[in-house]
Image (cartoon, grey):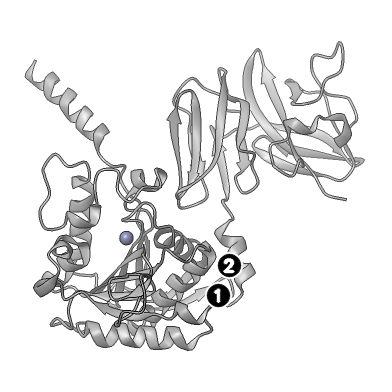
Amino acid sequence: MKSILFLFISFIYLFASNTPFDIYKKETNPQEHTLLIIGGIHGDEPGGFFAPAFLESYYKIKSGNLWIIPNVNVDSIIANNRGIYGDMNRKFNTIDKNDKDILTVNRLKELVLEKRVDLVLNLHDGFGFYRDVYEDAVFNPNSWGQATIIDQEKIEDKFGNLSQIANQVNTNLNKDKLFAHFHVFNVKNTQTKEKDEQMRQSLTFFAVSNNKPAFAIETSKNITDLTYKVIYQLKSIEEFMNIMDIKFEREFDINNYEDVKSKVYDFGKVTINNNITLDLSDIRNSVKFLPLKKDGNKFEFSHTLAKFKFIENRYEIYIGNIKVCDLMPQIFDIVESPNKIKMIVDGKEIEIPFSSQVDIKNDFKILKSDFRANIIGFSKNGVDSEDDILIKKDDIQDVYSLDTNQSKYRAEFYKDGKFVGMIVLNFLKK
Ligand SMILES: [Zn+2]
């Protein structure tokens, strides 16, 4: 009886904890420097988690090592809340053993203290614009935005001259073209030991107290353009990498705003149960009657910040703190099938596997197979399986499109009442 009770309690406990975060290690040589980047400790500060997601997706490390945690506070990011279990960045000195963040905080502390980690960056969006003299309610010494934060001048370490390093980072950052002159970065020394009792609970103070160099990068909450924040965060991180001899290549031009923006809002794809793949960048707010299992559906996302939440019979899909869509299931038995479907697309016969997309200029026809075809938004009297019919875009009702541009439609395939797979029909713009 005792062991059953224990199991039950630990299940509840596990369930009540914050969702474990992800860590990505881009390593070249363990003898070289390692930078640990911690993003998303505050769930409503998107500069702090979209930037590390970018590092994970679009940077190649040529020498040195980069450890990236894009989404430390998973549950709070989905909730777009600073901390749904309280402020995680005030739990690094003392924490209650029943705190829902305790597993996350302990795991972070271990990572920070790992011998191989040479320097730690904690990424935020902070209020206002930090200035060392008071100008007004937004630009003043109590603000946090557009600043590199240090807890003290220095510690004893090869990267221990915190003040000098932070100033060097900002000097180089400010040399580049800023999107507005008042976006200039400054160094804020919180003098935590002497002056800031609250900050003695913070992650960076935990690090420097253990003689580990640590900084916070704060872009401003008053800058509302997420792309600006991501660019400023990345430029700061790149300066730290330069100081640490970590060499990198990126697959984009950081000074090309449109290029960065298109990547910030590329939400990638989700594959469900290996038989449906949906593009999340242009998906409708709500997709109805999606053939899914009653439970145990398997979601695989390409975006680092993608998570789902099952609530009141629907799956809410998130990229960071952005809710992308609701998927409303229609429950089926599901057979995972590696089969292909033969189609005639614009006059050419091709074979398309389930869980993929076919581009169509004018028309298509699904050829007869072992499966019953159902094209969502198309109907013809007396037809059970919608194959062997030549179909144009105008034959399908717009309201059934998967995407907001009314280009993508669903062809679903069934056998003996069980769902076997979907092909997305993508009509190219003329
Ligand atoms: Zn913060």
Q: Amino acid at mark 1?
A: Ile
In the displayed structure image, the side of residue 89 where residue 386 appears, left or right: right
- Which residue is disc 2 drawn over? 260
Kindly give the residue lying farthest to the front in the view shown: 136
- The tag earlier along the polypeptide, 1 or 2, is 1
Q: Is residue 210 visible?
A: no
Marks 1/2: CA–CA distance: 7 Å
* Residue 254 numbered tag: 1
Mark 2, other Cα within 10 Å: few <14 / some 14–19 / many ≥20:
some
Q: Are marks 1 and 2 in contact (CB under 8 Å)?
A: yes
State ligand 1's quadrant: bottom left
| Residue at image point 42% right, 87% down | 172
Q: Please provide percent x and percent y for residue 167.
A: 32, 86
Kindly give the residue lying farthest to the top in the view shown: 382
Callout 2 secondary element: helix
| Residue at image point 82% right, 20% down | 379
* Residue 25 numbered tag: none
Q: Is residue 131 visible?
A: yes
Total labels drawn = 2
| Residue at image point 83% right, 49% down | 429
| Residue at image point 12% right, 72% down | 195
Callout 1 secondary element: loop
Q: Quadrant of residue 365?
A: top right
Q: Please provide percent x and percent y for residue 236.
A: 40, 76
Q: Quadrant of residue 3?
A: top left
Q: Amino acid at mark 2?
A: Val
* Quarter of the N terminus within the rendering: top left
Q: Please provide percent x and percent y for residue 260.
A: 58, 67
Q: Quadrant of residue 381?
A: top right
